[in-house]
Amino acid sequence: MTISEAQQTVDRWIKTIGVRYYGELTNTALLMEEVGEVARLMARLYGEQSFKTQGQAATAKEDLADEMADVLFLVICLANQTGVDLTEAMKKNLEKKTRRDAVRHASNEKLR
């Protein structure tokens, strides 16, 4: 699925199953909640924090994928609501990063 197809698919889903978009501020708050859930799992999977139960550890990778998909879904909702073409935005963003960081990362001793 391309980014454009994802934007169209989410829009169709919202307008049929979801009834309508939540307001932009509500979706922003929901996005922050989902990012927090990704952070919680990352801290337990890759950081020093442990899971409370063995059952949580068993499904953590699947849970992480699902939470990341929730984040993506909400970013797409916000893009659709605000008229942002994410394909074009990503192209421009990568061009900006390429110009800005063409030498920066290669010369960063910390990355060697």
Image (tube, rainbow, N blue to C red):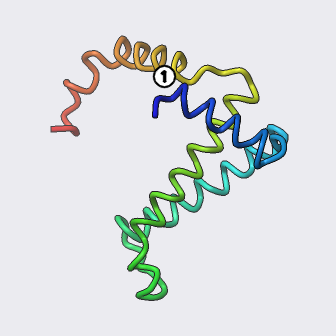
Instruction: Identify the image quadrant of the C terminus.
Output: top left
Q: Position of residue 6 (x, y in %)?
A: 56, 34
Count of numbered circles on the image: 1
Secondary structure under tag 1 reads helix
Nearest to the observer: residue 105 or residue 46: 46
Between 19 and 58, the one lying in front of the other is 19
Q: Nearer the viewer, residue 2 or 35?
A: 2
Residue ID at (67%, 29%): 79
Which residue is label 1 attached to?
A: 90
Vertical order, 29 against 76 (above or below): below
Residue drawn at point x = 34 percent, y = 16 percent: 98
Percent x, y for residue 50? 41, 79
Does 93 appear above or below 40? Answer: above
Find the residue positioned furthest to the left: 112
Q: Is residue 30 above or below residue 79?
A: below
Residue 85 on image: x %, y %: 61, 20
Q: Residue at x 74, y 42 (%)?
A: 14
Quadrant location of residue 21?
Answer: top right
The kind of residue on which mark 1 rests is Met
Relative placement, left or right, of 54 versus 23 is left
Along the horizontal axis of the image, is 100 left or right of 68? left
Say above or below: 102 vs 40.
above
The crowding category of the residue bearing disc 1, from other C-alpha atoms within 10 Å (few below 14, some 14 to 19, many at least 20), is few
Residue at image x 73%, y 43%? 28
